[in-house]
Amino acid sequence: MTAQTTLKDRFGRQIEYLRLSVTDQCDLRCSYCIPKGFKDFQQPKEWLNFDEIERIIRAFGALGTRRIRITGGEPLVRHNLAELAGRLSQLAGIEDLSLSTNATRLAKQAAGLQDAGISRINVSLDTLKHDRFKTLTGGKLSKVLEGLMTAKSVGFKPIKINTVALKGINDDEFEDMVEFCIEHDFTLRFIETMPMGSTGRDATDHYLNLQTVKAKLAKRFDLVPGVMPGGGPARYVQVAGTDLRIGFITPISQHFCDTCNRVRLSVDGTLYMCLGQDEQYPLRELLRTGCSDEELQQHIRNAIQLKPERHEFESNPQKIVRFMSKTGG
C-alpha cells in the first residue's frame, strides 16, 4: 500500500475500517439504543442509494480501506441487501465484508448474503431468556435463535455474539452465554454501555466495568490469552480446552482511542469520525452535485483529518445527543 493509498489521520492512525449504515431503522427497540415508540427515522429519499454507496466504498477502497462492515439500524430491513453486498464484495481493495445484525430476519436471508460475499456476521444478543428479551427489545427471541442456527447451517464462521453487559438486567446470564457459545461454536463478545443519546445515558445506571465481568467468569472458567482475527477493538481470552474466544470491548473502562482505525458512514451520507464526538463530513450532496472520483477521494481525505484524538464519554457524557442507530452501529 503506497502513501497515496493509505488513509491516516493527524494522529498517525491508519483508517482501514468503515462501518456502513444502510438504514437507521430497526425492527427492535433495545432499551439502550432506540426509545420505545420512536419513529423519527430518515425517509428513503434522504438515504444513499446503492449506486451512491458503491461509489463511496470504491473511493475508500482506492484509499486503502480494506474492511467494510454493513450495519444499521438493522441492516436486514433494507430491501435487496444481498444485491448491495454482492456489488461491494467485488470492489477493488475490499478484502473483508461483514455484517452486524439482530438476526430477526436472518433465517430467510442468510444463504443469499453468504452467496453475495459476506464472510462474517456479528449478532446482537443480550439475553437467552424469552421474557427478558421481550422486555429489553420488544421482539421475539425465537426469531433470533432461528436466524443464528440458519447462519450456522449455511456455513458462516465465525459467528460473533455481541452482548451488552447490563448490571441488574442480564448480569446473571454471562456464564450461560459462555456455555451457549461453546455449544454452538460461536465467538462471544461483551460490550460496555456508552452514553449515546437519552437512551444510552439512561443505561449508564446499569453500566458494568468489564474487568469485573472477566473476573467473575475466571472463577468458573479457565481463561487463557486468546487472539481473534479482525479489525475491531476487542481484547480476547480463550476458555481452555475449548475453541471459544471471549472478547471484551471496553470503550469506557479501557478506551482504545489511540488505536482506533475506523469511521462510520450513516445512511444519509454523513461520515462520522467518532462515536463520542460531533465531527462529521457530509458526502451525499457532493455526490448529487457531480463531484468527480478524484474530488470524492480528496473530500474523504479531508474528512479523516477531522477525526478527534479520543471520545469524551467519561468527561462529557451529555455531549452526544444522537442515537446509536443514527450513527451507524
Image (cartoon, rainbow, N blue to C red):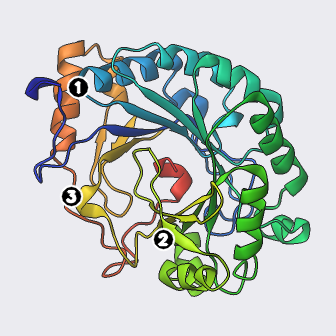
Measured in 3D between alpha carbons, the distance from the residue under mark 3 to the one under mark 2, in whole angstroms, is 17 Å
Label 3, residues with CA under 10 Å away: few <14, some 14-19, many ≥20: some
For marks 3 and 1, give the CA distance: 20 Å
81 or 64, which lies in front?
64
Q: Name the residue type under label 1.
A: Leu
Position of 63 compared to 17: left or right? left
The kind of residue tagged 2 is: Met
Depth-wise, is mark 3 or mark 1 nearer the camera?
Answer: 1
Q: Residue at x 45, y 55 (%)?
A: 227
Sooner in the amino-acid sequence: mark 3 or mark 2? 2
Viewer can see residue 66 = yes
Q: Position of residue 63 (x, y in %)?
A: 23, 25
Answer with the quarter of the image where residue 109 lies.
top right
**Callout 2 environment at 10 Å: few (<14), some (14 to 19), or many (20+)?**
many
Label 2 near label 1: C-beta < 8 Å? no
- Give the alpha-carbon distance from disc 1 to disc 2, as whole Å: 30 Å
According to the picture, the residue beneath numbered tag 3 turns out to be 308
Label at residue 194: 2
Q: Position of residue 38 (x, y in %)?
A: 68, 58
Sequence order check: which comes first, mark 1 or mark 2?
1
Left or right placement of residue 130 versus residue 171 in this view? right
In terms of depth relative to the viewer, which is nearer, 214 or 266? 214
Residue where numbered disc 1 is placed:
63
